[in-house]
Image (tube, rainbow, N blue to C red):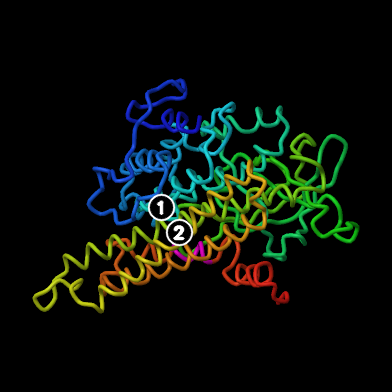
């Protein structure tokens, strides 16, 4: 069924949502390349599934309409990339990992990771990937834990691109201490009144929905720290009373807005509660491991894009009568960066496979999934940083110039190192949960 879903999404026939699953299956070879950009693709494609390669080819074709210059202009102006979102929604890609009965493709995080890596690697970088990022991972808990009625009401319009969602978890005074979130949701008859503050909420300026984690029981009244938080899928009406946004000026990915969000008795229906009250933290964890895989893929794409630019420049730039790439001082750092990306790629898609398989394979524990997803995010973020830095340096002074785009990649590569969890917290997690070392914080 998954393979047929990919065929439905592919666009050689200008696929629309009315196309059935009986379209002819596109056959794939792990060795094929993509004609519009084959000459600059350096990532090894062996070992990927036919479905992943189908996804990569179709997304590459869509992204070929949005070159580096498009992203440079949007980064400069801060204008949201509505055209990319519309192009992806048109062919159903927003719902790549959502159920088929709701209009999604019914594929896994493995394929979704490939999609977001391909977007990033096209030159769109973190900005392009982040334009649909939350709509892929933040909807996973909704798809799994919402009632059938809620799923039918909440998800199809997201998949079709009519709605967009943002994800409201992080708060300014709690940061990584998710269990101490302070935003409150107080029951009032058939409604909840939301009060509190969220920060670093991407796409809130264009979103019409928010997946929101809020406290329904005061922290001092719960038996376990993981209790007392609840998950909601709410209307995000910026004109309604009790909701205010403040845009954050930031270093990179400037076409995707980041925001502080203030709630002051913002009223939402009780029917927006997902799952049971007080169980929101356990529910939202289902999306957090998925997010780590997706972000790892986005980091990989950025790293490969930077390395492709550097390799091309090093072959073309001639100094002292020879291409600079002939010098080991240029060649070896780029080669080492490539190997780091390839190693991180293996960790990333291993984690995605574990995540997908854990739903049906009882031998795969959530501990194993958590370790794999966190490790992948860490390794991919570090590999991307190294690749972007070395790309800038290989370009010399031109690496500092906007026209070569690698300075934009460099500014964006800090995102996967910082979010959604820091490098240091991942090291803490592995030290404690894997190595059995005493908790350090």
In the displayed orientation, state which residue is furthest to the left. 321
Q: Give coordinates of residue 367: x percent, y percent.
A: 67, 58
Can residue 400 be seen in this snapshot?
no
Quadrant where the C terminus is found in the figure: bottom right
Q: CA distance from mark 1 to mark 2?
A: 8 Å
Q: Which quadrant of the view contains residue 34?
A: top left
Is 180 placed above or below 92 here?
below
* Residue at 30 percent of width and 52 percent of height: 69
Q: Earlier in the sequence, mark 1 or mark 2?
A: 1
In the image, the segment drawn in magenta is 412-417
Q: Nearer the viewer, residue 347 or 189?
A: 347
SS at circle 1:
helix
Can you give x and y, in whole percent of width and height, for residue 177 in the image?
72, 64
Q: Residues within 10 Å of mark 2 (few under 14, many from 20)?
A: many
Residue at which label 1 appears: 120
Q: Are marks 1 and 2 in contact (CB under 8 Å)?
A: yes
The residue beneath circle 2 is 299
| Residue 215 included in the magenta stretch of the image | no
The image shows residue 334, relative to residue 351, as above or below, that is below
Instruction: Quadrant for residue 169, please give it.
Output: bottom right
Residue at x-position 25% and y-position 48% = 38
Estimate how packed mark 1 is, as few (under 14), some (14 to 19) or many (20 or more) residues with alpha carbons within 10 Å: many
**Observer-nearest of 268 and 53:** 53
At x 63%, y 44%, the residue is 361
The overriding secondary structure of the stretch rendered in magenta is helix
């Amino acid at each position: 069924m998954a393979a047929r879903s990919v065929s439905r999404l592919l666009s050689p026939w200008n696929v629309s949502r009315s196309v059935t699953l009986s379209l002819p299956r596109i056959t794939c070879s792990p060795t094929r390349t993509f004609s519009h950009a084959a000459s600059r693709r350096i990532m090894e494609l062996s070992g990927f599934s036919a479905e992943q390669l189908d996804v990569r080819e179709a997304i590459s074709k869509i992204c070929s309409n949005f070159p580096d210059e498009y992203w440079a202009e949007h980064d400069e102006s801060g204008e949201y990339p509505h055209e990319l979102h519309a192009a992806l929604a048109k062919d159903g890609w927003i719902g790549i990992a959502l159920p088929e009965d709701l209009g999604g493709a019914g594929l896994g995080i493995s394929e979704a990771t490939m999609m977001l890596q391909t977007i990033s690697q096209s030159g769109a970088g973190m900005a392009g990937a982040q334009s649909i990022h939350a709509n892929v991972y933040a909807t996973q808990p909704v798809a799994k834990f919402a009632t059938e009625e809620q799923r039918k009401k909440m998800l199809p319009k997201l998949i079709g691109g009519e709605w967009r969602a943002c994800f409201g978890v992080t708060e300014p005074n709690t940061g990584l201490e998710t269990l101490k979130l302070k935003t409150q949701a107080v029951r009032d008859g058939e409604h909840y009144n939301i009060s509190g503050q969220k920060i670093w909420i991407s796409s809130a300026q264009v979103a019409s929905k928010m997946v929101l984690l809020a406290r329904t029981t005061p922290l001092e009244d719960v038996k376990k720290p993981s209790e007392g938080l609840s998950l909601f899928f709410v209307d995000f009406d910026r004109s309604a009373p009790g909701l205010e946004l403040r845009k954050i000026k930031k270093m990179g990915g400037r076409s995707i807005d980041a925001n502080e969000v203030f709630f002051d008795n913002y009223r939402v229906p009780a029917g927006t509660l997902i799952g049971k009250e007080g169980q929101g933290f356990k529910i939202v964890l289902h999306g957090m491991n998925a997010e780590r895989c997706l972000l790892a893929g986005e980091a990989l794409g950025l790293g490969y894009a930077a390395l492709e630019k550097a390799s091309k420049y090093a072959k073309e730039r001639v100094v002292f009568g020879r291409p600079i790439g002939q010098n080991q001082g240029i060649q070896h750092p780029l080669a080492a960066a490539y190997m780091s990306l390839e190693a991180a790629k293996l960790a990333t898609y291993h984690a995605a496979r574990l995540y997908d398989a854990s739903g049906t394979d009882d031998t795969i524990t959530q501990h194993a999934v958590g370790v794999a997803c966190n490790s992948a995010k860490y390794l991919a973020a570090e590999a991307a940083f190294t690749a972007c830095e070395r790309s800038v340096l290989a370009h010399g002074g031109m690496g500092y110039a906007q026209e070569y785009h690698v300075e934009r990649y460099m500014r964006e590569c800090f995102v996967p190192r910082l979010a959604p969890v820091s490098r240091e917290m991942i090291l803490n997690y592995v030290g404690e949960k894997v190595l059995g070392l005493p908790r350090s914080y």
